[in-house]
Amino acid sequence: MRASVEQRLASELEQFRRDGVYKRLNYLDSPQGPRVQMEGRGEVIILSSNNYLGLANAPDVVKAGHEGLDRFGAGTASVRFICGTFTIHKELEAELATLVGAEASLTYVSCWTANEAVCPTLLGPDDVVISDQLNHASIIDSIRLARQIVKCQGAVYRHSDMADLEEKLKAAKGARTRLIFTDGIFSMEGDVARLADIVDLARKYDAIVAVDDSHATGVLGKTGRGTPEYAGVLGEVDIITSTLGKALGGAAGGFVASSAALCDSLVQRSRPQLFSNALPPTVTMSSLAAVRHLRAHPELVERLRANTKYFRDQLKARGFKPLEGDTPIIPVILGETSKAIQMSDLLLNEGVFVTGFGYPVVPKGEARVRCQISAAHTRDDLDQALAAFDKVGSRLNLV
Ligand code: PLP
């Protein structure tokens, strides 16, 4: 690397450290789970993973991954339409479509690429995409790409503000297609999109709705079918994108679920499908096992809900002020970024891994530690974490 580039990078990294936004990687030497072995620290309770159902190391999920490797080898060794695709891809895509209440689905190597596929493929210069202000970065980048490549129009509505969304829909009256794009659960706030209202508005203004349900698949709704089930609009959302890297096994991968025609169009034209490899068989089969595990064990979703309620209630009883909500994302607002980082570091010293987030990831003055609960946490795990919150909270004069 040229010295001038090295110097530039070194000074940028130094600035990250000075600003308190430098991210340190913590290495785990065991499978993901409620308790892990962290290099240099020993056993640590994880309150920061998206392993919502605890399936990342479930025996049937791991076994299915092995079977995938034995039966199909490491991977397709090219793009699906060029070199062939595995029968298990078809099987997984059928299961995913059924799970989220759609006609068809198409997998990608991540939900990031699934999102990135949607807008540039579906939209053109006569179309408008209307996006919630707090949407995930992958939706924002999908829209940026579409605006750049296919020259569609874009608008942003204030977070979950239905009056503002309606204004934006009215303003887009002349467009060929109006696409409303929202997260199901918003990852930094842990709140849920007002999906029933959004679907109503879409009907009123002849728009279509896309929901990124990455944090909600396997989590929301009575049987974990996501935000549409929670909001009573299962089967009424035009496009659902989601990840296989959170509740559904936690490996990697994502998908778009929609009509057969839309999924076929993505096969034909979406660039992350046309120019990138398929999901590896290990991931395909472990995800398939995770979907089937969820269907066979809806009580996991209930346990996740009960764990979440317990943890939120106990935090409040101890004087913390977690944001209210129905989801296993529980942000505890601390104010200054330095406070969130300090709290996260002190909690880790107490054997509890909770990530701190500050500006610019969240607004100034709203820095937070974000707790994420899993169905796999035992009462003992949660109580030990709460004891650590007590100790660190009083040390920082928070409670
Ligand atoms: N969408 C949302 C809402 C997410 O939270 C994430 C992951 O953080 C993604 C998309 C990206 O998912 P993946 O890890 O499968 O690329």
Image (cartoon, helix red, strand yellow):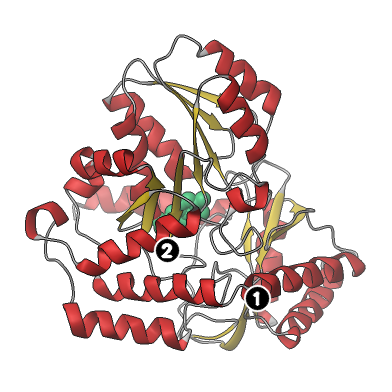
Residue type of the residue flagged with mark 2: Leu
Closer to the observer: label 1 or label 2?
A: 1
Q: Secondary structure at mark 2?
A: loop
Disc assigned to residue 97: none
Q: Is mark 2 within 8 Å of ligand 1?
A: yes
- Residue 95 placement, left or right of 26: left
Q: Residues within 10 Å of mark 2 (few under 14, many from 20)?
A: many
- Residue 170 placement, left or right of 2: right
Q: Position of residue 231 (x, y in %)?
A: 66, 47
Identify the residue at image location x=23%, y=81%: 69
Disc assigned to residue 299: 1
Specify the quadrant that holds the N terminus. bottom left
Identify the residue at image location x=45%, y=9%: 174
Note whether 109 is above or below 181 in the view shown: below
Q: Residues within 10 Å of mark 1 (few under 14, many from 20)?
A: some
Quarter location, residue 344:
bottom right
Reading the image, the residue beneath label 2 is 244
Q: Nearer the viewer, residue 221 or 355?
A: 221
Q: Nearer the viewer, residue 232 or 83?
A: 232
- Residue 77 placement, left or right of 222: left
